[in-house]
Amino acid sequence: MRTQGLTKAVMAAALLALACAGHAQIKLGVSGPTEGSNAPSMLEVLRGAQLYVDFANRTGGVGGVKVEIVARNDDFKVDRTVEVARKLIEEDKVTALFLVRGTPHSQAILPLLEQHQVPLIAPSTGATIFHEPVNRYVFNVRTPYRLEAEKLVKLLHTTGVTRIGVLHVGDGFGKDVLAGLQKGFAGAGLQPVLVREFDRDTATKDTMDFMAPVLQDLVKSDAQVFVVVGAGLAWR
């Protein structure tokens, strides 16, 4: 997410929370990998959001109301995300959830939003499920993955690339991006030379044997470019 997008996300979250709450303080709850191998990119976004919140608070807050970010670690595990989101809502009494990381993770907490009537602002995912159908508790600021993926194929095609392979994670994130890539292939009159799915939880730090047959297929496909769709592994 670019700085402008992050600023927009913080302000959207604060303003919406202010409109919905009427509290003396706006609390934005974040569930994400704040520890471990998946933490760096999450912490980067959090620090950017905190910088803007600090600025807003120094200059009078939002409508005179101070903003606080409450972040809890979920180890980038879907079941932990649900547990953490519940704690943020029920124990921390957050006004809104904010920047929750991951497609399956954000999808898993949708029932909590409905149950507690708590909005989710700027989820860190561009999956279509958060755009279609419209969910009154989800407020997106990120471009949909499918549109990005479609444009990627178009861009590669304009540079003369016609043989494209796809390696994608087999969760909601990977399948959503794959749908966008397929639309891009159709629009460019192309077919992918190879499409392979993988399970992000299969590999460990000590064994990458599961990748050997995949790599052999990649070489045999004679692709000019491979599009790899996936998130990092929480290696321990």
Image (tube, helix red, strand yellow):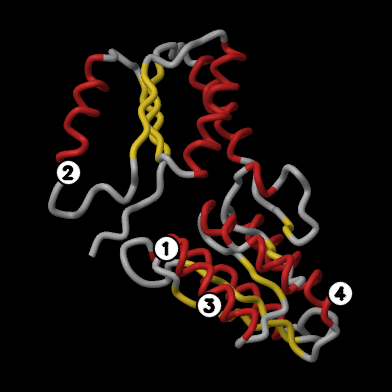
Q: Residue at x 76, y 64 (%)?
A: 12
Q: Which residue is mark 2?
A: 208
Displayed quadrant of residue 41: bottom left
Label 1 vs label 3: CA separation? Answer: 15 Å
Q: Residue 125 placed where, x, y %?
A: 57, 51
What amino acid type should be assigned to the residue bearing mark 2?
Met
Q: Judge depth for marks 3 and 2 and give the one in front.
A: 2
Displayed quadrant of residue 33: bottom left
Label 3 vs label 4: CA separation? Answer: 22 Å
Label 3 vs label 2: CA separation? Answer: 33 Å
Q: Which residue is mark 1?
A: 77
Q: Residue at x 51, y 74 (%)?
A: 83
> Is 135 left or right of 100, judged from the image as shown?
right
Task: Give SS at disc 3.
Answer: strand
As displayed, is residue 2 above or below residue 37? above
Q: Judge depth for marks 1 and 3 and give the one in front.
A: 1
Q: Nearer the viewer, residue 109 or 206?
A: 109
Task: Give SS at disc 2.
Answer: loop
Disc 4 crowd rating (10 Å Cα; few below 14, some 14-19, many 20+) is few
Q: Residue 154 placed where, x, y %?
A: 56, 20
Q: Which residue is mark 3?
A: 71
Label 2 vs label 4: CA separation? Answer: 50 Å
Q: Residue furthest top?
A: 189
Q: Residue 181 placed where, x, y %?
A: 53, 26
Label 1 vs label 4: CA separation? Answer: 32 Å
Q: Which mark is residue 117?
A: none
Q: Residue at x 45, y 69 (%)?
A: 80
What amino acid type should be assigned to the residue bearing mark 4?
Ala
Q: Which residue is mark 4?
A: 19
Task: Name which of mark 3 and mark 4 comes first in the sequence.
Answer: 4
Q: Residue 182 placed where, x, y %?
A: 54, 22
